[in-house]
Amino acid sequence: MTDDFDGELGFEPAVPATGAEPSAAARGPQRRPTLRRKLAAAAVLTGALGAMGGSYAAFAASSGAANQPSSAQQIAEGRQLFENSCITCHGANLQGVVGRGPTLLGVGGAAAYFQVSTGRMPLAQQGPEANRKPPMFTEAQTEALAAYVQSVGGGTAAPTGNLRGSSADIAVGGDLFRLNCASCHGVTFKGAPLSAGKYAPSLYPSTDKQMYTAMLTGPESMPVFSDNQITPDQKKAIIAYVQNIKASKDPGGEGIGRIGPVSEAVVIWVAGVGALMIAILWIGAKSQ
Amino acid sequence: MTTTSPVTNPPRRTQPRTPAGKMGKFVDDRLNVAGPLRKQLNKVFPDHWSFMMGEIALYSFIVLLLTGTFLTFFFDPSQTEVVYNGRYVPMQGIEMSRAYASTLDISFDVRGGLVIRQIHHWAALMFVAAMMIHMFRVFFTGAFRKPREFNWLIGLGLLALGIVEGFAGYSLPDDLLSGTGLRIADAIMLSIPVVGTWVSFLVFGGTFPGHIFLDRLYIAHVLLIPGIILALISAHLALVVRQKHSQFPGNGRTEHQVSGERVYPIYAAKAGGFFFIVFAALAALGAFAQINPIWLFGPYQPSQVSSGSQPDWYMMFLDGSTRLFPSWEIRLWGHTLPPLFWPTVVLPGILGAMAALYPFIEARMTRDYQHHNLLQRPRDVPVRTSLGLMAITFYVVLFLSGGNDIIAHVFDISLNAMTWGGRIALLILPPIAYAATYRICLGLQRHDREVLEHGIETGIIKVLPTGEYIEVHQPLGPTDDHGHGLLEYSGTPVPKRMNQLGVMSPVKLIRGFFYPVTEKPELQAAIDEADAAETSQRQHQLTE
């Protein structure tokens, strides 16, 4: 989103602090979404409801260049799903409905993918934060919806391919996680509350793609971690760390929630002190 | 077996014949210790299950010394930066202090290191917990009264030192959690008006975190504080020996006479056995429950922090008070009083002072300056018991508020609601606890009197020839002409159910709650026979 404005307002995109081919890779896709968004908006505004035609398909395919091209069929399927399940709150043209849901123009396929695949959308109820729940759509349907949202409004597209770094990246990913993510999700990513009912969720149910799209789009209370801030390789390293720790066993025995001193306090008072209280009652009973 | 002190044994005149006896004579011939030692070993300790809570603390401390000594072989408190190359993959290649790296090594590369580390940490939590419940026992039974005020104060000192010692241990591994804790400790020092900055500079040798602090903390943790704790424990126990252990009133137990088991062999066997039970419980926790997984927390970097960072349980009440206290910043005469100052310096200061002064305040308020060797049942001193429950309620609200983010997250409650709930509960619940406890104490007192007067409910309902239904009560002792008991309340438990007649052991009380405790079969048969005979005789009389 901010990337789009960079192009329009004539700013040079900031050089990523962490290196890794800054201009060519980063700048190219940034200009294309702007063009694509304008054309897409124009297409919608002219009421071209027969947009599944050949020219539109060709256009959509060429605009999604950085990622897997979405086929016209996929977009059509996404549109069908959208009109069945999303249109009430987000509007026929993704422009949003006052009091119900925000516009989806410009949010991009990545955000749509995250929200739908984690079950947050369709929304159960308005509240401080959308909760994760079993997703309503299959993975293919979710991708179709994302492709449709991407095709209409443009924005940050959902990534494809392998999103998890190699085992060599785990340690670096851990350091990045503690620096960027632990202050909300917690160092063992069990989640934590924010103010007034908002919260940072646990990452234990999250897939690679969900974590990646969350970092890209900053859903709910989360900030956006753009590719300038955390490069794609670093994102993949963070995902490698999280998935590695999730899969690892606890060498010290029962993990008791991996949340540190609070659960340890419960264990020492209930199990530890409790057991020894029973022991002294037993010994005390022998005295009479 | 109950023995009454003082005990005098006839002197042995024969020569020892067993190997142990010969060895004893060999030692005694050279050191001449048999006389005083015999006196000590024959010393009588009163027995009650609640007297063993302090022992848990003592044995946990011994476990701490044993496991801690093992850990010192491998731990290096240096803050020198190294690159980790140990066995734990998710940390390989990460820069960290030698303190953190050596803790990782203890956890993953030293044989048995992790389980010893975990036992050490669980024992630390148990040490403070046991001291606290021991303190509750002493408080609620009035064991702190004259002449034992010194031991109350020494005990409070031990509790405070135990908390400081535990926090030092929590801070040593230099992981993200301990570094965050030290950062907060530094902030608390800084919050002290006028001298705060200088105190912080003095402790950290400059600005936080500095390069020397862990070395200082290490010596404090392994030598200085344990040494003081050991000295205070010795003084604590010496005073118990000197002043004799307090006891509940009862058979042979008066203000002037101690009744219980001799130190050797019964008490020594019990205490020795209980040591191994405590050790086993701590070892089981260390083996089966993971504690302080520092490898998940990462090395301390001042730029990093984790949500849900809590101190160990005994510090959590200060975390809670900080979370609940409003953010009032006061500026006076060019000095700032930060909001952190009140909940972390003033509040524990007040709580500690109130606890230390309580024995003297109570003596003044009740004008009771007598010697007391007999303990009181909590119900018999409702004001003290209610004050204690009030204090515990206050503490528990603070303690729970220290983990209010975890509670909010787990139970899906707004964190703001938790904070406000904690603030309101902190002011409202303690008085409610006082009032409720007071009523419960009075109710229990009255029930004791009622049973003494009317006897125990037997559960047998009788129909009188007039058609009236009455419940048969079993008097506890001689009765007057109206059938009212003549026994006075004497500060001892009153049996409330038939099961409790003759047995007041807590286990049998629990067992008898669900079904009647029957005697041995042959004995029970004899009792049944006698009952039947008595019943038939009575019926015989009625028919006559």
Image (cartoon, helix red, strand yellow):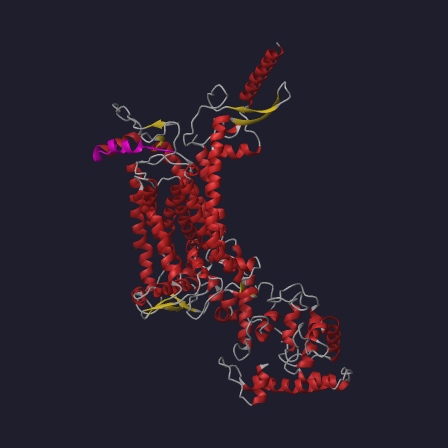
Measuring from the top left, give residue A261's x and y in whole percent.
47, 56
Residue B504 appears in the picture as rendered: no
Q: Going by the image, does B56 lie left or right of A152?
A: left
Question: Residue, x 65% and y 74% (percent of image)?
Answer: A112
Residue B314 appears in the picture as rendered: yes
Q: Going by the image, does B157 lie left or right of A269?
A: left
- Above or below: residue B194 compared with residue B519: below
Asked if the magenta segment contains residue B35, the reply would be yes
What quarter of the picture does the C terminus of chain B occupy? top right
Question: Residue, x 44% and y 56% (percent of image)?
Answer: B316
Measuring from the top left, give residue B122's x and y in whole percent.
44, 51
Q: Specify start and end residues of the magenta stretch as a single range.
A: B29-46
Question: Residue, x 48% and y 81% (percent of image)?
Answer: A17
Residue B136 position by quadrant: top left
Asked if the magenta segment contains residue B72, the reply would be no
Q: Going by the image, does B291 lie left or right of B139?
A: right
Q: Going by the image, does B248 lie left or right of B530?
A: left
Measuring from the top left, give residue B174's x and y in whole percent.
40, 63
What quarter of the picture does the N terminus of chain B occupy? top left
- Above or below: residue B441 compared with residue B537: below
Q: Residue furthest top?
A: B544
Residue B231 versus residue B474: which sits nearer the camera?
Answer: B474
Residue A3 position by quadrant: bottom right
- Above or below: residue A86 compared with residue B139: below
Measuring from the top left, give residue B277's x and y in whole percent.
44, 41
The kind of secondary structure the magenta stretch mainly shows is: helix
Residue A89 versus residue B162: which sits nearer the camera?
Answer: A89
Residue B251 versus residue B544: which sits nearer the camera?
Answer: B544
Question: Residue, x 32% and y 41% (percent of image)?
Answer: B363
